[in-house]
Amino acid sequence: MKMERPGLIRRIIVLGCLGLFALAIVWRYAGLALATPSGAGLAPRVVQVRGSIHDRSGRLLAVDTDLYDVSVWKPALDSTRQAEQLGLVATSLQLDAAELVRRVDDVPNDFLYLARRIDSDTVRQLIDLIEANGIVGINIDRVAGRVYPEKNLAAQLIGFVGTDNTGLAGAEAAFENDLRADPAGGRAGFAYGNSVFLTIDVDIQFRLEQICREAMAENVAEAVVMVALEARTGKVLAYISLPDFDLNHFLDADQAAWTDRVSIYTYEPGSVFKVFSLASLLSLGGIDQASSFICDGSFERATSGGETITIRCLGTHGQVNLTKILEYSCNAGAAGASETVTTGDFYQRLNAFGFGQRPGADRPSESSGLFRDPDSWSARSKPTIAMGQEILVTAMQMASAATVLANEGTLLRPRTLEAVYSHSGELLMAAPVVPQGRFMTAEDARIILDAMEAVTLESGTGRRARIDDLRMSVKTGTAQMIDPATRRYSDDDFIASTLALFPSEDPQYIVYTAIIKPRGESIYGGRIAAPLIREAALLIADLYGTARGTTPVATHSGRVVLSSPLAIDIGGTMPDLSGVPKRLLTSLLTRRDLIIDLQGDGYVAEQSPAPGTPVESGMTIVLRLR
């Protein structure tokens, strides 16, 4: 988002606050209706309004509102009509009347909360009821409330506040000092916090959450995580951790939903990590493009103590170089390549990629993962780490490390903060791009990107991520999880993951996803995570105008540049139409020899019949889009 439009920003912030004044009127009305002389002589109150949270385009994600606590002071109740009046109040608050009467009768200290943090509509109805029926002894107190208009959207990223309107999690906690209002020395009136703009794009976030939610259901998974970055800035476009929860009712969620699986949850990354292992070995001079290793189904090495270390591969790949190690995800090749550098150098270079360190993405309680000092490594640690075991990472670390490849060897700090504005719309801070150091040449970064592109070949594990008119650098992974009971690798629990940078020739975006504990038809990253990456890349490329062969390209100047798309046609066999936009399919509706059933909008997600099926006259072809 361009930050040089203070007028627009000011309008966005002011519009977000207009509702606060209306609700403040309700609060004052309630105070007048129920005020008692005991408040006389108190200093004028300053209403502190917490700053709002927005996405990069100004769309509202969190805003203050008025909520109310309703309580009873038992000595002030009309004892002759107590049960009747409490019954009316209970009905208004949707409480059980008999239970409320019992609670008031049994209250030990004469004071009892009847309802906490209720909305202004409910309070208005209650005030009308109180005045119409002469009810006494009921107190209404305004409390600061927080509303999240998008509910579950980016729940773990945005976070929530406590009953005192102080941030407890996510951006609400990370940017507490910016969002919290300064009472300004006790002056009467209102004090406002600053408005925080995050880097996420609501459109991208919403669509990718839908895709991940479907993948979670289809694969009967415990959780799904996805993070998308702008490769050249480190800005987080999407931050997805499922299961999630409605921020307006965060207390109803369980720990599984609260867990931030992007920045806090750690796990062994598996074969995706080979990208960074080989990049480290290449940049250290241990290997080059011509280096080759033999995979006969396993890697073996005798230690000085007479022990033989054995690391098994999923196949027998023969002679493999850097590209083939990634293409086939060859364990033996990665293990053999790790022998070309010292333990200390290998550790230091992987650490430079950000492993074992907090990424610094403005997240509270951000995890550094677990990357043990080499002094504690065993004889098998180096080859094992090279293939993605004996190291714990976060999804954010994996995406962040990939910025090295996209920026000719320079690591960028990931960012979730776009900018901070005052209540009046003044730009207070625009978050900068933060390079973390360069330790790899542009030539070596290009070698790794090209090798990752080979992963999408028909022989590669990432072929299901391939998009014919968009070059992608991809790596898949399947990691066994540790069983906490036995402290051994589980036979049932796996993490399927995939990393992608695109377009390969000039990476603009990084997407990483992991499917945790799938229980569906497959556990392999190449089968279930790679298609997820494909859908994400199609979405991002379309919404941001990334050049894709014959696909129309929207530039950021606002001018639309159209190439000449090839007409979609169906001949003697059914083509693979996955990912084809609806606008390229409408010409099929003119076919008189086929019945074309287009369902939904967007891009082809499912088709019947399957690709390769012979097409016959009169056949019905169903294309489901989303």
Image (tube, rainbow, N blue to C red):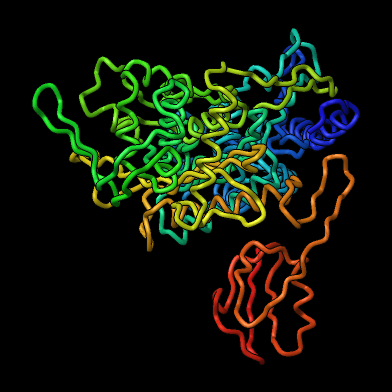
Give the tally of numbered discs: 0
Q: Residue furthest bottom?
A: 618
Q: Is residue 550 visible?
A: yes
Give the side of residue 207 with respect to residue 113, left or right: right
Which one is in front, 474 or 424? 474
Name the quadrant of the C terminus. Answer: bottom right
Give the side of residue 536 with respect to residue 337, left or right: right
Instruction: Kindly indicate the quadrant of the structure image that contains residue 343.
Output: top left
Q: Residue furthest top?
A: 185
- In percent of width and height, residue 320 lies at 37, 42
Q: Residue at x 83, y 40 (%)?
A: 556
- In percent of width and height, residue 525 lies at 42, 51
- In percent of width and height, residue 620 lies at 64, 86
Q: Is residue 162 visible?
A: no
Which one is in front, 582 or 66? 582
- In percent of width and height, residue 192 lies at 76, 21
Q: Residue at x 11, y 29 (%)?
A: 307
Give the side of residue 421 with respect to residue 480, left or right: right
Q: Residue at x 57, y 53 (%)?
A: 534
Q: Residue at x 74, y 48 (%)?
A: 547
Which one is in front, 369 or 255? 369
Instruction: Kindly indicate the quadrant of the structure image that contains residue 186.
Output: top right
Q: Is residue 464 above or below residue 180?
A: below
Name the quadrant of the N terminus. Answer: top right
Q: Is residue 278 above or below residue 180?
A: below
Q: Residue furthest left?
A: 306
Q: Is residue 189 above or below residue 405?
A: above
